[in-house]
């Protein structure tokens, strides 16, 4: 019986010693991991140190990008879209016989006005002092083609101003022509060209049906 008691005591002591060794080893591993950037699975990489989402703040909320340190450069953006219309509406536009007036002139002015108010309509856009905004609208066989060019000398781009100009011009065409054609659709709304800023010069690919 004495031998059994001694044996059990010895086993208990060995078990306790092994546990202490394991605890010490685990503690040493954690300390070493912290010295090299954190516990495995939680190490901070350069990418995670600074969020890659430019429009999100530290709390994950949508925020306007701080462009204070960016250089002021000449910037330009060109956009396009088209409104698909029926032959009946095309004829009325051509004859300028719609009750609401001259569709092409009103839509062109609407596009210009919209570009100047982009910061009010798109939440995270900066206020820009536009150097110029041009909107061109043409009646073609089965659609109204809309083109815009926006220019600015600033710290951020002018793409949204150009896009908003054609978008609002297109919606104005629909508003003025819906009494004749309720099936109109806006197609090919896109950026054609962009110049200035860090991202350099961009030119869109193959032309859409609008051209």
Image (tube, grey):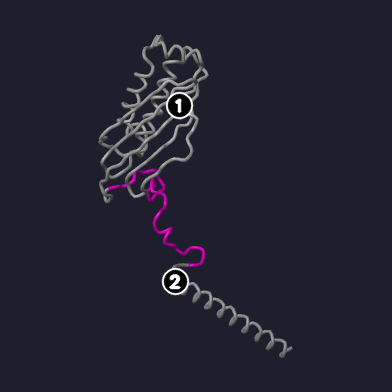
As rendered, which of 62 and 74 lies closer to the eye?
74
**Residue 129 colored magenta?**
no
As rendered, which of 17 and 24 lies closer to the eye?
24
Which residue is rendered at x = 43% and y = 72% of the image?
35
The image quadrant of residue 127 is: top left
Which residue in the protein does label 2 denote?
36
The image quadrant of residue 125 is: top left
Which residue is rendered at x = 47% and y = 29% of the image?
210
**Magenta span:** 39-67
Which residue is rendered at x = 50% and y = 12% of the image?
88
**Residue 49 colored magenta?**
yes
Residue count near mark 2 (Cα–Cα under 10 Å), binned few <14, some 14–19, many ≥20: few
> Which image quarter holds the N terminus?
bottom right
Q: Earlier in the sequence, mark 1 or mark 2?
A: 2
Q: Secondary structure at mark 1?
A: strand
Residue 204's disc is none
Find residue 19 and report its horizontal and vertical position in percent: 58, 78
The image quadrant of residue 98 is: top left
Left or right: where does residue 197 sit relative to residue 183? left
* Cα distance between the residues tagged 1 and 2: 57 Å
As rendered, which of 138 and 81 lies closer to the eye?
138
Magenta stretch, main secondary structure, is: loop
Q: Nearer the viewer, mark 1 or mark 2?
A: 1
Find residue 54 and report its horizontal and vertical position in percent: 38, 48
Which residue is rendered at x = 34% and y = 19% of the image?
105
| Up-down relation of residue 133 to residue 55 (above or below) | above
| Up-down relation of residue 108 to residue 30 (above or below) | above
Find residue 34 and report its horizontal and vertical position in percent: 44, 70
Which residue in the protein does label 1 denote?
82
As rendered, which of 53 and 89 lies closer to the eye?
89
Q: Secondary structure at mark 2?
A: loop
Find residue 141 and report its horizontal and vertical position in percent: 48, 20
């Amino acid at each position: 019986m004495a031998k059994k008691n001694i044996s059990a005591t010895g086993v208990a002591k060995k078990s306790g010693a092994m546990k202490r060794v394991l605890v010490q080893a685990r503690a040493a591993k954690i300390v070493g991991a912290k010295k090299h950037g954190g516990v495995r699975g939680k190490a901070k990489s350069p990418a995670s140190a600074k969020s890659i989402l430019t429009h999100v703040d530290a709390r994950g909320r949508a925020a306007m990008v701080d462009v204070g340190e960016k250089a002021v450069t000449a910037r330009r953006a060109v956009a396009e879209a088209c409104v698909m219309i029926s032959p009946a509406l095309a004829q009325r536009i051509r004859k300028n016989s719609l009750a609401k007036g001259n569709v092409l002139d009103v839509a062109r002015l609407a596009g210009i006005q919209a570009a100047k108010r982009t910061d009010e309509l798109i939440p995270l856009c900066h206020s820009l002092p536009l150097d110029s905004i041009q909107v061109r609208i043409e009646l073609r066989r089965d659609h109204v083609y809309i083109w815009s060019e926006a220019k600015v000398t600033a710290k951020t781009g002018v793409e949204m101003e150009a896009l908003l100009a054609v978008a609002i011009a297109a919606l104005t065409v629909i508003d003025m022509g819906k009494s004749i054609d309720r099936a109109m659709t806006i197609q090919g709304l896109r950026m054609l060209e962009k110049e200035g800023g860090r991202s350099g010069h961009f030119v869109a690919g193959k032309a859409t049906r609008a051209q």
